[in-house]
Image (cartoon, rainbow, N blue to C red):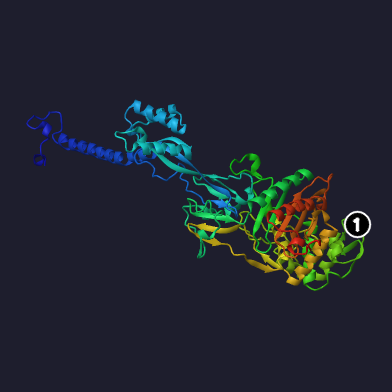
Amino acid sequence: MAASLAPDPQHSGAPLDDNSHPNGDLIQKPDVWRFWLLVFGFAVLAISVIVPLVVHQLLQFGEAPRPGVGHQGQSPRGVIVDRDGALLAGDYYFYQVTATPKNIKTDAERMELAQQLELLAGIPASKSYDLLREFALFSYVELAPAIPLESAQRIMAEQARLENEPGLFAISNVNLFPAPKRYYPEARLASHIVGMVAVPENSAWVAGFYGLEGYYDNYLRQRNGVGLTTDASASLLDLEADTRRFLPSVAGKDLVLTIDRTIQWIAEDELQKGLRKYRAKAGSIIVMDPRTGAVLAMASLPNFDPNRLSERDVAALQNPAISAQYEPGSVFKVITAAAVLDAQLIKATDLLTDTGSIAVGDRVIFNSSRAAWGPVDMTEALARSLNVITAQWSLLLGADTFYKYLDRFGFGQVSEIDLAGEVYGSVKRPGSARWSMSDLGTNSFGQGLAVTPIQMANSMASLANGGKLMKPYVVQARVAGGLVQTTIPTVQNLTVQPETAATLTEVLVKVVDQGNTAAGVAGYAIAGKSGTAQIPTEEGYTEDETIVTFAGYAPADDPQVLILVKLDRPDPNISPWANYTAAPVFAQVARRVFDHLNIPPDDVRLGKIVAATE
């Protein structure tokens, strides 16, 4: 076989070494050659695959980011405006500044560009120069993560000026990429309604949290395919000119709210004054249109500035108006009164005897004053806020009927308002292991059950609206490009018959005039009721710490606004009672809201003023 093999070229014509195997060299040398050939092949493959990955991904060498892609890859979000077009949330555009260093050949050109950028955009020249030198062979380097729009415009103007000039200019190798950042021009105003955006842990993308930013997060994102849910026949031009000042946005998906910025400011201003005056720890105010369920204002303090959150603000992110349960106290007596009237078990003028105490189940119920008032009608019972009479109403209703009415009013449920973070109310019911007959009595005056401010406000609003319980909402319209989808008010339930609502409204006007006079506004008939509730703890109810509420609506004959005021833990040395704390705050809010909405006093509105005779 040796004779048939071709001789090794290196030994052709030369004698073999006597000490070597004649066939050894002929076989081993080709194997070495094949080995190195394989090594070379793998090396070429590695260079062709790995190096481009390292260059592109680690060194950012090669293709620069596409125009329009921000530094963090964020896409624009739609704007949020109030009912009159005032901007509550929008994108403030910064610009990422990058360059192509490999096209800038000399240190002189690098220094010239660095000085230009410092002059035009305030980017330190020394920083730009060092980066351009360090990455001189690269196709991409970031010189600044975010500069203001005005600075970016100056750079673009200079680039445009030099386009028609002969020669090559270093500034032509500078690229600008929009980097939207969320901005809230009203800062703390309506912050619980608007919400905020942030970058979640282990994510590179911003997301909406709380309020509207959370509830409508998918809709507000430009890159998300979520759009209008139904055919939108309205055009953007159908909106008032002021309302569409900022519409449509770059994202093309925007929200127009029911919120009135001025009423929101009034609510927050009066709430702040109330907390200070009565030294309360926190509070909420809700202003609604009871005819539609539209929320005109929703204020809670403490609040937060979504532009600059601190650790102190984190606890205030949740919106107490929709997420804080509390025992409402005597304001809830209005619901029991509505039920017993609607069930036609008594008339508003019927007398029941208050003996000062009543046993319901295994519990004896007293009036807060511990007094007995004898025969009283519904108006006096509510004006004096008598627990004993309210418990009698619940016994007349019976457990089944009483809790059916609570269902009608939406208690123990969510209101379905379009804000992130709403919680259910809490109502024990017959058949539950935790319910006993005594709960029927205590629940009748707002003890032993829990509501949220929006649930309490909405239930009262149904009485102002002839018994129609509306679905509360804060978004009046969703805008997608040139189309508009308007929210249609939705009736959720019929709480009581219109006649019942009208009768109870007359009673509640007298309650304000006789028992809650601090809530009155001169010239206006206001229907309402106060509520003072002790705070439950594991050891029982607190001695002197209370939560106080006043809810009312006006004008009583044609209700246009429903206002609920809730204060947490007013200083008992000033007053623990709603009639002396929440009621006067209500009056201040109502007076200013009537003026803003141009609701004339009753005499003027009803044409009852007679011109003086000459």
Residue 345 vs 476, above or below: the answer is: below
**Residue 513, percent from left and from top:** 83, 59
Q: Is residue 420 left or right of residue 284?
A: left
Residue 317 vs 229, above or below: the answer is: above
Locate residue 486: give its quadrant: bottom right
**Residue 379, percent from left and from top:** 84, 64
- Give the residue pinned by disc 1: 370
**Residue 271, percent from left and from top:** 72, 48
Whether residue 484 is visible here, answered yes or no, is yes
Q: Residue at x 35, y 34 (%)?
A: 138
**Residue 253, percent from left and from top:** 50, 55
Residue 600 vs 2, above or below: the answer is: below
Q: Residue at x 83, y 48 (%)?
A: 575
Q: Secondary structure at mark 1?
A: loop
Look at label 1 and name its amino acid. Arg
**Residue that sits furthest to the left in the current view:** 13
Whether residue 140 is visible here, answered yes or no, is no
Is residue 544 or residue 240 the one in the foreground?
Answer: 240
